[in-house]
Image (cartoon, rainbow, N blue to C red):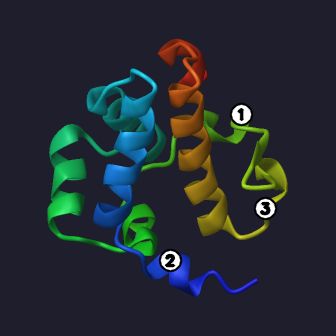
């Protein structure tokens, strides 16, 4: 499957959709930022810089300081695909983020989302 189009999407264009999804279910932008920073290793300032620079998804994950070691504990199905079976490392990271925001929107406790 060719995911080039997805990889070229700017993270700044996807970010408001992630926030909106969470806010629709009573969660906050700050909680979305918390899960993004947990997954990627960005801090709030460096996350904002990525948004301001309008980097694409590939660059966003390539520039990430460090994928959290517990990211491999993110399992389940997202968009009809089992996360742990996705072979493309970049697509798997994108789906990790989707899954974390889904869990947030479903009301799961932040401690459980962050695999503590």
Q: Which residue is mark 1?
A: 73
| Between 62 and 51, the one nearer to me in the picture | 51
- Characterize the local packing of mark 1: few (<14), some (14-19) or many (20 or more) Cα atoms within 10 angstroms: few
Q: Secondary structure at mark 1?
A: helix
Q: Position of residue 25 (x, y in %)?
A: 46, 26
* Distance from Cα at disc 1 to Cα at disc 3: 14 Å
Q: Nearer the viewer, mark 1 or mark 3?
A: 3
**From the viewer's perspective, is the residue at label 1 or at label 2 nearer?**
2
Q: Nearer the viewer, residue 48 or 43?
A: 48
Residue 5, x across and y down, in percent: 53, 84
Q: Residue at x 55, y 18 (%)?
A: 107
Quadrant placement of the N terminus: bottom right
Can you see residue 74?
yes
Q: How far apart are the two marked residues, 1 and 2, measured between alpha carbons?
A: 23 Å
Q: Are marks 1 and 3 in contact (CB under 8 Å)?
A: no
Count of number-bearing discs: 3
Q: For residue 7, which numbered disc appears in the image?
A: 2
Q: Earlier in the sequence, mark 1 or mark 3?
A: 1
Left or right? Give the position of 18 relative to 71: left
Q: Is residue 36 above or below residue 111?
A: below
Q: CA distance from mark 3 to mark 2?
A: 15 Å
Residue appearing at x 79%, y 67% in the figure: 87
Residue 65 visible in the current orientation: no
68 or 106, nearer to the observer = 106
Decide if residue 38 is on the left or right side of residue 115.
Answer: left
Indicate which disc, 3 or 2, sits on the residue closer to the N terminus. 2
**Label drawn at residue 86:** 3
Compare residues 13 and 68 and report the one nearer the observer: 13
| Placement of 28 over or under 12, stated as above or below | above
Secondary element type, mark 2: helix
Assess disc 2: are there few (<14), some (14-19) or many (≥20) residues with their C-alpha within 10 Å of its C-alpha: some
């Amino acid at each position: 499957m060719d995911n080039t189009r997805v990889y070229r999407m700017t993270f700044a264009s996807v970010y408001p959709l992630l926030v909106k999804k969470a806010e629709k279910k009573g969660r906050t932008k700050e909680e979305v930022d918390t899960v993004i920073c947990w997954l990627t290793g960005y801090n709030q300032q460096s996350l904002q810089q990525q948004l301001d620079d309008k980097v694409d998804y590939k660059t966003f994950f390539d520039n990430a300081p460090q994928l959290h070691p517990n990211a491999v504990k993110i399992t389940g199905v997202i968009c009809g695909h089992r996360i742990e079976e996705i072979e493309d490392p970049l697509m798997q990271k994108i789906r990790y983020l989707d899954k974390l925001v889904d869990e947030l929107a479903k009301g799961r406790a932040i401690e459980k989302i962050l695999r503590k």
